[in-house]
Image (spheres, grey):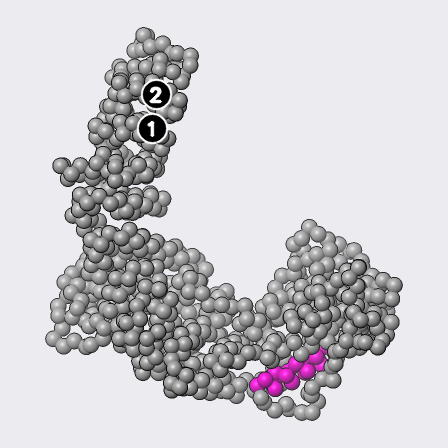
Amino acid sequence: MFRRNHADTNLRVPQNIYTVDYLSYLGNILSNHENICKINKKMIIDALNKLTQVLIWGDQHNSAIIDLFLEKQILQQIVCILRENYGNKVDVQILQTSNMLFTNFKNETSLYYLLSNNYVNEIITHEFDLRDEDIVSNYISFLKSLSFKLNSHTVHFFFNSLEDEFVLYTESCKLCFHEDNMVQTYARNITLFIYSIRDELMLKFIVRHSQDYFNTLIDTMAEKAIDMDIFIRSAENVKANRSTLENMMFVYNDYCNYINDIFKQGNEEISNMLMQTMFNRLISPLFLVSLAGLRESPTTILLCKVSSFYFLTQLIRLVNDINFIHTLLSALFFGDQNEIGTQWTKNMEGIRSLSSRKKASTSQERVFFFAHLKALEITNDDHSVFYGLFLLFAIYQNKCVQSDILEAARLPCENNSECDGQLFECLTKIISNCSFYSSALRSITLELALLILRHFVMFMESDHYMPTSIITVATDASEKIINELQDLVFTEDSFLDFFESEYYIFERQQLKINDISEDASLLLNPPTTIGSLIPLAKRLPSIAEEKLRRSLFNWFQLRKFLHDLNSETETELPIVKYIQPVVEVGDRIQTNHVDLVNCTLVTTDKVMKNLFLVTDQFQLIFVEPQSKLGVVKYTGFLKDVKAFSISNDSKSLQIIIEDNRKNLVSKPIKSTINSSDKDSIVLSSNLLFNGKVRFDDHIRCMTTKQRLDKGRLAARKFLIGHIADIFKIQRPSKSVQNSPYISHVSRTKGPVNMYKFPGGVVVKDIKNQRESINGTAANKISNLPNMNIPGVEDI
């Protein structure tokens, strides 16, 4: 394999590499490395590479190979080569060889030899060029492999109690702040593994030598938090900035998770040291000082309240240590400013540092708790209100929070039904504020407040005055919203669309604490423009239409909240239940007694489908005839149907069916086919159907358009009437009355499994042919109709 040169004329290459002779050959190459010039260093790299293969094979199959490796002290030769500094390529190969040996050696005797004589520690402390990506990646992998071999039996190979050295730990700590995320993660994992080892002398060493590491760790967190706060306050809430902030949030949360992992190792001395460092260098001098606005001098660094709430919330969310959480909540609920001895400052050169803080002559009690309550007051926006509520919500979500501290702070909990009066007032004011048409309160903030109040009510006695007060405030707010909307119910053309759309959004949406904590759009200043692409519930409305939608969404929240408090169930929503049961795609209907209009659907690729159009009282139905039965191919509610004349084609209509369950009604748009199946189509936006329909003549075309327009108007009036009933407001005239719509099982004119609908349409369940996609008629009545329309080709 190796070619002979002037320096190696006596080296012969054995043919079988998995032999003692071949290992001896490789050992001779390494021992004669002084005779190899740097030009020939490839020979050393090849020898080290082959050496790895032979030793791993010998460890599992031939102990004589390992015996020779020990006898010739080849590991010492490798370390000698490392000392010569042949360059990065040789260093990389030595690291790879060492890593492979420690990863693959199974024999304890072989492993103990590798760890003996301090050769490993010499490799760890060698001054590698860690700026080289190949070297740093192999170096950290080598350290990680070593950590896996660390246990109570092998710890003495790494930790030298006489010299007071533990280079695996100290070097790993240095790499915890490397710019490469992978290197950081590996290094932190190594420290965590070391903290888990139960060796008294080693742990005492760690306690003695970790203060500087913890100081740097927490100071780095503080620097990240300050930089993140600057970005939060200055950046516009646009996609690019949200992406940048998400990365910053990930980094901070990663630090929190690492701290939680250190606490989880269960070493009391290490945990106490870390906790003390966090309070002295991060929580008190930065987060709590900023929350209360305690600026001692112009150089004092204060975060905005939103940032302070966010950073504290993430610590409470992600750190699950009882002592830490208890200490943090004690400071938050009962601390005063004189308990803080340090603060973060920035000098004229922009250099940040931690400095001492003077004690105030007078000190306000519970200054941080009252600052928290002050932040719950709505002013120009609800940004700090939202994150103040988020902190409160996170406290209730953390299982390490003990009820005694909540009871002391007068927060409702398992052993306490009382609530701090000022906090209760703040929460009820949020509910009242949501009823104003031009309120600065976002729907997501209201939702969070209602969630917290639900938690409070759970712990209150049934005869307590607060649940009654909450119901009264929520009822008043709900009625005020109705008063704001009642004039629009019958005058706003899109009110029905808005009502249904917001209801379905409300039904789908579920507030999750993980989603909130990772949502950069909430952390940046709330935008007021549609162009931000942020859901309306997470921003302020910018136009009258959005204010209407927000009011509806808030009303749905209050309605659900009141139902929950009163132990009631929803019986009137969704309003589409008033026009059930319905015909669905795949049903077979009798066509003997209905008006069928022959038509042709024209697709974009000029494919034509001959179908019949049927208009029920509440539905538009396209059927394909099959011997006195029609198979439903496409269908939709008349209330959602729009028919447009085509200027250059008097025999055709452009028919659009929208679905308010998807999103807000939009302008007609052209759909795209996203499936290879020619009979199925996925429509963009909220469209169910968008097709060109051609009739036999102009008369049938115009008659069908008039019928569709009148059917749409009648169906919408019918449902608007039910909304008026739900709102308990008077209908404007007798023209909008309850529909005479009746649906019943036909027992006289048809078989048992036939169902008659208005307009003479009968649904027939033929099990031997094809069942309705929603199963039995009972299911049709109890469930919302499935309005996904497969098989529609779009124009």
Q: Is residue 295 left or right of residue 665?
A: left
Q: Which mark is residue 63?
A: 2
Q: Is residue 390 left or right of residue 34?
A: right
In the rendered image, the quadrant that contains the C terminus is bottom right
618 in magenta: no
Residue at coordinates 77% horizontally, 66% vertically from top-left?
A: 765
Choose between 15 and 242: the one closer to the eye.
15
Residue at coordinates 32% horizontally, 59% vertically from top-left?
A: 319
Measured along the vertical axis of the image, is residue 133 above or below residue 18?
below
Residue at coordinates 24% horizontally, 38% vertically from top-left?
A: 155
Amino acid type indicated by mark 1: Asn
Choose between 299 and 628: the one closer to the eye.
628
Whole-angstrom CA distance, mark 2 to mark 1, is: 10 Å
> At which x and y percent is residue 285?
21, 64
Measured along the vertical axis of the image, is residue 691 above or below residue 100?
below
Amino acid type indicated by mark 2: Ser
Q: Which mark is residue 107?
A: 1
The answer to which of marks 2 and 1 sits earlier in the sequence is: 2
- At mark 1, the secondary structure is loop
Q: Quadrant of residue 220?
A: bottom left
> At which x and y percent is residue 690?
70, 64
> At which x and y percent is residue 653?
77, 68
* Residue 416 shows in this picture: yes
718 in magenta: yes
Choose between 671 and 178: the one closer to the eye.
178
Q: Is residue 553 left or right of residue 266?
A: right
- At mark 2, the secondary structure is helix
Q: Magenta stretch?
A: 711-727
